[in-house]
Amino acid sequence: MKSLAGCLLGLAVLVMSCTSPITVDSDAGQMTLDERPDRIVSLSATHTEILFAIAADHLVVATDLTSNFPTAAEATPKVDAFNFNVEEIAAVEPDLVITAFNFLGEVSALQAVGIPVLLLAPASNMEDAYHQIEILGEVTGRSDEAANLVSSMRTRVEALINTASGDSLTVFHEVENTLFSANSSTFLGDIYRRLGLSNIADAVPDDFGSGYVQLSEEYVISQDPDLIFLGDADFGESIESIGARPGWDTLTAVRRGAVFELDGDIAGRWGPRTVDLVEDIVTAINSVS
Amino acid sequence: MSIPAAVPSSMRRRSYIFGGLSLMAMVILGVTVGPVRIGAGAALREITDRVLPLSVDSGLSEQDAAIIWQLRAPRVVLGAMVGAMLATAGGAYQGVFRNPLADPYLLGVAAGAGLGATAALAAGAGADTLPVAAFAGAVLAVGATYYFARAAGGRRTSATLILAGVAVGSFLAAVQTFLQQQSSDRIREVFTWLLGRLSASTWSQVVTVLPYVVVSLAVLFAYRRVLDVLSVGEEEAATLGVKPVRARLVIIAAATLGSAAVVSMTGLIGFVGIVVPHAVRMVAGVSYRVILPLSMVVGAAFLLAADLLARTVISPGELPIGVVTAFVGAPFFAVILRRREAS
């Protein structure tokens, strides 16, 4: 009897010392982990940056090829998320995979081989991004670090918004050179909106509701936007290449030099460095107005 | 020698007038219709101001003037050139191979040109080298098609040639796909090119392609009587003083050069080379003296009409023009096949 009580007590202590199940909201439904993961594979550069920023990097065993920041993330073992292969990832024996996309059925493929997946789809505004940081904090046991990161980001972003003088300026954001643009319902578009800019892509019907709409060259030229941001500078677009396009030399933004190249790695992610992006955009706006 | 014309000359004259008027109408619509509303009068005044040695004030803003002259005008000129070239080359191929199905696509010319241009793009070559690279690929394709058709033995029938063309075209297309996969950073550019596009037309493209098209058309027109003679039969042609082998090579080379040059700029735009010459044949008779010049005019009008559809159907978005020509051309092609079966 005495030994049984000891057993029960021992079991209780064991359970207490282990973590209780973790449940978070993933974009593929609720996800529950029985214990804290310590072999995480990140298939998303954004979430790799977040994991490193909240001091959860020691839990990361492999990252996607595009995870190039911070430098330490670049040095982790690599997997290829673009050419997704479930066996390549299973070979790393992860106890959690974090991904931003489910184009190829990554979530069900990984779940089928018993690997838990946390799907955090691209954020559509800063609040979404903050929430994803908090989720990663909860999952990795770094909630305090996550809360600190969010509050410092929030403070800086609000301060930057107050210094921007973008009212009444129009903006064209180029996602790529076939003139896909981002309207105000996208993450970047929401930042432009909060900085007071008026986005020329908002007047174009968004049939798929993706927020990414293709503009015609005629439309961009006729709108003569005050500011042009290039999300495709990494693919070789620049103020020179824009100005060399037929008819674009008549644009006010080209003539005044109000064409700005964004760092594609930062502009395409919704992580800790988004604050630097906001700062770059505010500097650009204030140099024009 | 006199080639019987099954169609009265008044009918031919009317066809020329109809073709010319359609082309004119398409040119005017081409510069006045677009996602941005610009009045037709102002647009035409702007064109007049640029083209004629007159100073006409169009009253347009600088940006709208640029839309007319830098975007729409080169697009219309390039579109007309591409349509004229593909239709004339198609007519010439049909004559020289004595095969109603011959066209730049079925002979593997387009696939060869596509491979040449893709290889150049993948190697990082500039746009002005594309026509040359495309021509090299196209010559390779026609040569291979011709060789395999001959290797099939004495029975060098229409079907043998087309089957050889399809085999060569499929093989070259496979190589092209492989190259695309190898250079995935430029893959998007290649994909949009494959569907055919006029959307990025510039005056510099017009200038790059123009010499090839002019030379090709001039040679084909010079040989249009020879095509009529060849259509009677090789032996008859030889007795009339035409060297059949040499004449064929010159015509094939000219048609291939022109097709490759336009394909290298605008990508794969299908069915023009087969639909237009057949339509022309139906109303204006079987003589290549009529088919070639009329195909040129009607081909230009046809492509501009297709482009007009491509950019208005899902405006402000744009369909690849190759989708429109296939959508209009494939059913038309089926009708032609049925008629030939019936007759």
Image: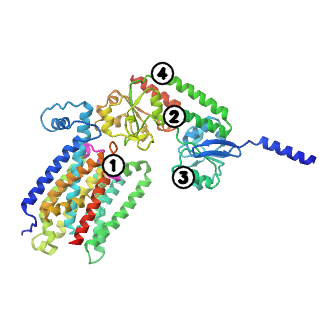
Query: Which residues are the magenta region?
Result: B193-205
**Label 3 to label 2: alpha-carbon separation:** 25 Å
Say if residue A61 shows up in the picture: no
Are discs 3 and 2 located on one and the same chain?
Answer: yes
Residue B82 in the image, given as x and y percentages of width and height: 24, 52
Marks 3 and 1 belong to one chain: no
| Element assignment for label 2 | loop
Q: Is residue A34 above or below residue A127?
A: below
Amino acid type for the residue under numbered disc 1: Leu
The answer as to whether the residues below labels 4 and 2 share one chain is yes
Is the same chain shared between marks 4 and 3?
A: yes
C-alpha gap between disc 4 and disc 3: 43 Å
Q: Which-is-in-front pick, marks 4 and 2?
A: 2
Q: Which mark is residue A90?
A: none
What residue did someone put label 1 on?
B319
The residue pinned by badge 2 equals A125
Give how far apart the Cα atoms at labels 4 and 1 are. 43 Å
| A230, A147: nearer the viewer | A147
Mark 1, secondary structure of its residue = loop
Mark 3 or mark 2, earlier in chain: 3
